[in-house]
Structure formats: C-alpha cells, structure tokens
C-alpha cells in the first residue's frame, strides 16, 4: 500500500492541473456524430463472433424530486410521480426492440440503473422493469452478475433496500457528497446523517455484495477541517468503495450551478489541501487508491481486479467486467457494442417519439477506426492497470510501439523528468507520484484533444 505522501504531490498536482476527459470512453462522447449510420449498430449487435461475450445493460431513470445545484447529470426535476409510468412503458418497449437485435441467450453479467434517481420509481414500477428485463434477457445468477443501482438515501427507506435486493440488485451506490449542514444547504441537498446510515445498515442486513459511496470536494463552504469531519464520519460507516469527485464549476453549461455563490467555493489551493486530506485519511483508514477519484478496501473486487490486472473502465466508471457489450436504455443512455458507440436521444420528447414510432431511440454514435481501437486500448490500460506493456500492443496490433508512438513517448519525457512515469524499452509505467495524474498521461495518447478544452471537460485535480 502507498503512503499518502508518495501518492500526493501538491507541487505536481498544481503544475499539471488542467481540464481533461474522464475517459469513461475513448473517443469521448464529444466525437459522436449525428450522421452516424444505425446499420453499424445493428451489424455489431448481430455479430455472431460476439456469441461468447456477455451483455451489460444500463437503464437511465432521469427523474429527480429536487435538484442539487452542483449536478451536471441529464435529469428532469419533477415532483409528479405519475411521470414515471409513461417512461417505464417506453423502457419496456425499448427492451423488446433492443432484444430483437441481439442473441439474447448471451448472459447478462452486468446491469446498472443510474440517473437521475432510479428509486423515483415506485417499488411496483421497479419490480415491473426488472421483470420485463428478465423476460427479454438472460440475467446470470447472483454470484456471477454485478447488478447495481444508484440510490439517493432521501428517496429510499430500508424497506426499499430490502425490495431492491429481492429484485436481484447486489451492489449499491449511495450519493452523499458532504455531511456538513451548511454545505448541504448551499447545494440544495439536505440529507441527514441518519438517513444515509439507515440505508447503509439496510444494505448490509440484506447482504449487498458491495456498498459504494460518492462524496464531492470543492463544494461551497467546504474547508479542510469540515471535509475531514465528513470523511471521518464516512470511514466509521465503512463502505467498501468511495468515490471522491472534484466538483467541476461550469455555470455556462449547467444553469443550476449559478444558484451557488462562486465566492463560497474553495480556492484552487484549498481544493488541493482538501484532496490531500482525503488521500491521507482514506489511505490511513486502509483504503487503496484505485485511480480517478476511486478508493476501495483491499477486499473489494475493484482492488482485487486491479491487483490482478483485470480492471476495466466503461461508461459507468471502473468495472471488473471486461468484454461485455453494453446496451443503453432510456433517454441519453450510451451503449457500446463491438466497435460501435451509440447514444439515445437525450431529451424525453425525442426519446418518446422514437420509441412510440417503434424504432430504437439512437440519436448519434461512432464507429471506431483502427486507430481509435488501438488508442482506446492504450488509455484503458493506463487508467486501469497503470502501465503499457509494449509487446502486448505489438502482438495485438502489428506495430512497433516505439515507432508508432514516437511523438507521444517524446512528450512523456517531461512527465518522466518530473517522476510521474518511467519509460523503459519494454514498458511505460505510471509511478506512484503519477497515479493521481493518470488522466494527464492518457491525454497524451488522445488524438482528438483540442488546445482549448476548458469548458468541455472537468479539472484533472
Ligand atoms: S445529483 Fe443526483 S439527485 Fe441530485 S439532481 Fe443530480 S441526478 Fe438528481
């Protein structure tokens, strides 16, 4: 295990901090094209060569009862619970439409409900959606499948958690962000500690395989001391995984962020100081830094997968399921099938119009070129396994790595001089001091990055 001091280098973090993609995909969604040919998706879905590949299903439930001011997700704020019903009916139709494109004897080893707020649906509606999913697809048994859901503790009682487990969910991810009441007021997310605690207790009592929690640093009124109190409270609750994201203030893009007074946001230096305390406290408490804001107990499957070099990354973040084809359901969801990315209509009207017309709701997408595939593989290896073994790429892609990526390796010499990476004749390794800046290393291999990424991507630190 690394000490916080070796992992956390404030001088390097300050120097390398820039705006960059989170690489839940490469190329990123910015490259998706409106003139994307849907036939590419259908061909990839029907590819007999994928018969042995598992499926992963993602369902986007966009509704939220109230809006958190920091949020950059695709969501619909409404208190009208009746809006869930027509959306659910369309998801069921979409399940049938997508199932008709795939060999549905392929096992589903990963399923995720995200949002928005998935538990905006009533218990009966959630049961209906899961039953429809099982009708059209083959979900693998509990021990072989990662069935996960994002839960807002304000929208879930212990009974809801019990219900979710009975429906087959076995991993749960809770939005918390910060326990401090002043911060909660400023972000319009009032969530008493007891609510979070009762949902976590219920998840344990119902034997969820993994409990994950999201926190955010860089929010209004946060200080090192206040966030340390949140961290200590959370460490006592002992989730298996923690994601501690840096808040990205982009009020030009996300209107609700204008509700927060920028003068109350921590300065860049305070953000780094808070992050330093995050790394210190969590590593002292026994969490392993996985990368990209993620920490996990050594017993958690993400930490074990990283140790075994089998960690992967997809649109939901880090994953232990490597080779799944991903089918997205609901407005704005993104699928990845073979070498094709496809994103649904992002607004509810467009989504409804497509499904009501009896067609898939795909709006835009991308078929990856050979160069995209190679660079995707490089970026996944860097983000997940923190090294590139050149011979693996040479065998898989018929290249000589040092020749094919001479300009990139030359740019990385500056990183090497700063101690972030080590470049040998056979591999490139991300050093401990470079782990928190792995996004910057990956960006060197991104063919699409433009000079000005300031309003499109979040800060790397
Ligand atoms: S953070 Fe979650 S609950 Fe809050 S508005 Fe965004 S999607 Fe809704």
Image: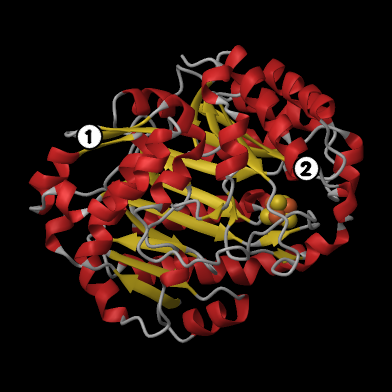
Left/right placement of residue 47 relative to residue 94 reads left
Q: Is residue 340 visible?
A: yes
Please say if 259 is above or below 274: below
Which image quadrant is residue 425 in? top left
Along the viewing direction, whichever of 282 and 143 lies nearer the viewer: 282
x and y percentages locating residue 261 in the rendered image: 89, 55
Residue under pointer 2: 154
Comparing 29 with 89, the one in front is 29
In the rendered view of the protein, which quadrant contains the C terminus? top right
Residue 283 as seen in the image, left or right of residue 176:
left
Q: Secondary structure beneath disc 2? A: helix
Q: Is mark 2 within 8 Å of ligand 1?
A: no
Q: Position of residue 304 (x, y in %)?
A: 37, 23
Residue 358, percent from left and from top:
42, 83
Q: Is residue 442 above or below residue 282?
A: below
What residue do we see at 90% from left, 36% from top?
181
* 5 over 62 or under it: above or below: above
Disc 1 within 8 angstroms of ligand 1 (CB): no
Query: Is 322 left, or right, of 218 in this rendering?
Result: left
Sequence-wise, the earlier of marks 2 and 1 is: 2
- The percent position of residue 192, horizontal first and vertical second, equals 85, 33
- The answer to whether residue 177 is seen in the rendering is no
Write down the residue under mark 1.
427
In terms of depth relative to the viewer, which is nearer, 192 or 223? Answer: 223
In terms of secondary structure, where does tag 1 sit? Answer: strand
- Mark 2: give few (<14), some (14-19) or many (20+) Cα within 10 Å: some
Q: Quadrant of residue 415?
A: top left
Q: Nearer the viewer, mark 2 or mark 1?
A: 1
Tell me what residue is drawn at x 12 percent, y 53 percent.
Answer: 397
| Residue drawn at (25%, 76%) of the image | 40
């Amino acid at each position: 295990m690394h000490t916080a001091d070796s992992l956390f280098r404030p001088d390097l973090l300050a120097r390398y901090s820039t705006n960059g993609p989170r690489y839940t995909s490469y190329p990123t969604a910015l490259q998706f094209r409106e003139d994307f040919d849907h036939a590419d998706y259908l061909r990839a879905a029907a590819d007999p060569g994928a018969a042995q590949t598992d499926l992963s299903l993602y369902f986007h439930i966009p509704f939220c009862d109230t809006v958190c001011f920091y949020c950059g997700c695709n969501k619909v704020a409404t208190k009208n619970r009746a809006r869930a019903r027509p959306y659910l009916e369309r998801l069921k139709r979409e399940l049938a439409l997508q199932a008709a494109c795939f060999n549905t004897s392929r096992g589903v080893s990963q399923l995720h409900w995200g949002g928005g707020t998935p538990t905006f649906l009533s218990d009966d509606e959630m049961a209906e959606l899961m039953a429809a999913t099982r009708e059209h697809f083959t979900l693998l048994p509990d021990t072989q499948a990662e069935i996960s859901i994002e839960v807002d503790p304000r929208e879930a009682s212990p009974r809801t958690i019990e219900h979710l487990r009975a429906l087959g969910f076995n991993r749960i991810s809770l939005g918390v962000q910060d326990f401090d009441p002043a911060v909660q007021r400023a972000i319009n997310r009032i969530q008493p500690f007891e609510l979070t605690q009762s949902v976590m207790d219920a998840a344990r009592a119902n034997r969820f395989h993994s409990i994950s929690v999201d926190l955010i640093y860089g929010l209004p009124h946060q200080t090192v001391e206040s966030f340390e109190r949140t961290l200590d409270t959370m460490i006592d609750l002992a989730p298996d995984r923690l994601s501690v994201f840096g808040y990205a203030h982009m009020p030009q893009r996300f209107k609700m962020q204008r509700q927060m007074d920028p003068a109350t946001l921590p300065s860049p230096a305070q953000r780094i100081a808070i992050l330093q305390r995050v790394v210190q406290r969590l590593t002292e408490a026994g969490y392993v830094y996985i990368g990209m804001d993620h920490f996990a107990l050594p017993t958690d499957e993400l930490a074990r997968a990283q140790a075994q070099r089998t960690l992967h990354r997809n649109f939901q973040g880090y994953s232990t399921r490597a080779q799944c084809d991903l089918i997205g359901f609901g407005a704005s969801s993104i699928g990845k099938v073979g070498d094709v990315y496809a994103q649904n209509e992002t607004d509810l009207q467009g989504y409804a119009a497509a499904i009501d017309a009896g067609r898939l709701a795909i709006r835009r997408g991308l078929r990856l070129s050979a160069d995209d595939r190679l660079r995707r593989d490089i970026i996944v290896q860097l983000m997940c396994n923190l090294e590139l073994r050149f011979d693996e790429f040479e065998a898989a892609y018929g290249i000589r790595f040092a020749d094919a990526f001479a300009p990139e390796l030359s740019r990385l010499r500056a990183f090497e001089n700063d101690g972030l990476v080590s470049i040998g004749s056979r591999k490139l390794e991300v050093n401990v001091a470079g782990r928190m800046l792995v996004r910057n290393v990956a960006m060197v291999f991104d063919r699409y990055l433009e000079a000005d990424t300031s309003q499109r991507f979040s800060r790397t630190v």
